[in-house]
Image (cartoon, grey):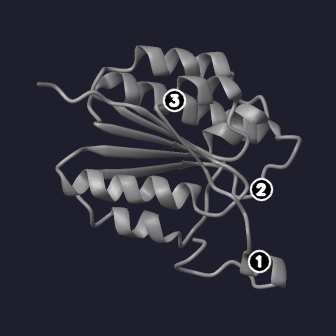
Amino acid sequence: MQRRGTVQVYTGEGKGKTTAALGQALRAVGHGWKVIVIQFLKARQGVGEIAAAKDIPNLHILQFGSGHFVCNKPTQEDQALAQQAWQKAREATLSGEYDMVILDEINVAIHYKMIAVQEVLKLVEERPPHVELILTGRYAHPKLLEVADLVSEIKAVKHPYTSGVKAREGIEY
């Protein structure tokens, strides 16, 4: 019997959406699955998951970002990088080569109209039946919440950042 992949969404204002998706990735590769993580809007040197993935068979992480936070008005460079990430996401998902595809921060890219929600909905429909698709980021579109099999909303209750603590190696990156 072939495994049926589901659609998972991790959204909300709290910390931990990418972390939850990476936990799923680690669990999956532990069972021999092939996993790709496509990070929209992210590009940073010294990120722990990038360094770790180099030593984990069947886990691939690709970053498509300019290195700065995208707030309200994406630049042309941000738009172009999001489109590159989207093309890679479609290719990886539809190839059937991967058992799990994680589109990290895709919800934010949709929110800023860098990727059309209709295109993502189409990908959800067209993906091979075994592919587990995970979508992360704040501002998850209601239509994606509707089609998802699992939705987790990460709520911000307290975070050291609000007390002036800067992002910490090994925790935030």
Q: Which residue is mark 3?
A: 148
The structure residue drawn at horizontal position 32% and vertical position 30%, both measured from the top left corner, is: 5
Left/right placement of residue 50 relative to residue 108 reads left
Instruction: Kindly identify the amino acid type of the residue bearing the numbered disc 3.
Output: Ala
Q: Earlier in the sequence, mark 3 or mark 1?
A: 3
The structure residue drawn at horizontal position 69% and vertical position 58%, both measured from the top left corner, is: 155
Q: Quick one: SS at disc 2?
A: loop
Residue 128 percent coordinates (x, y):
32, 20
How packed mark 1 is, by other alpha carbons closer than 10 Å (few <14, some 14-19, many 20 or more), is few
Numbered tag placed on residue 138 in the rendering:
none
The structure residue drawn at horizontal position 73% and vertical position 30%, both measured from the top left corner, is: 114
Instruction: Kindly identify the amino acid type of the residue bearing the numbered disc 2.
Output: Phe
Instruction: Kindly identify the amino acid type of the residue bearing the numbered disc 1.
Output: Tyr
Determine if residue 2 is in view.
yes
Residue nearest the viewer, comparing 19 with 50: 19
Of the two numbered discs 2 and 1 in the rendering, the one whose residue sits closer to the viewer: 1
- Distance in Å between CA atoms under marks 3 and 1: 31 Å
Residue 49 percent coordinates (x, y):
45, 65
Left/right placement of residue 96 relative to residue 118 reads left
Of the two numbered discs 3 and 1 in the rendering, the one whose residue sits closer to the viewer: 3
Determine if residue 115 is in view.
no
Q: Which residue is mark 1?
A: 161
Left/right placement of residue 99 relative to residue 31 reads right
Is 152 located above or below residue 170 in the figure?
Answer: above
Q: Quick one: SS at disc 3?
A: loop
Residue 63 percent coordinates (x, y):
54, 50
- How many labels, in total? 3
Q: Which residue is mark 2?
A: 69
Residue nearest the viewer, comparing 56 with 161: 161
How packed mark 2 is, by other alpha carbons closer than 10 Å (few <14, some 14-19, many 20 or more), is few
- Distance in Å between CA atoms under marks 2 and 3: 27 Å
Q: Earlier in the sequence, mark 2 or mark 1?
A: 2
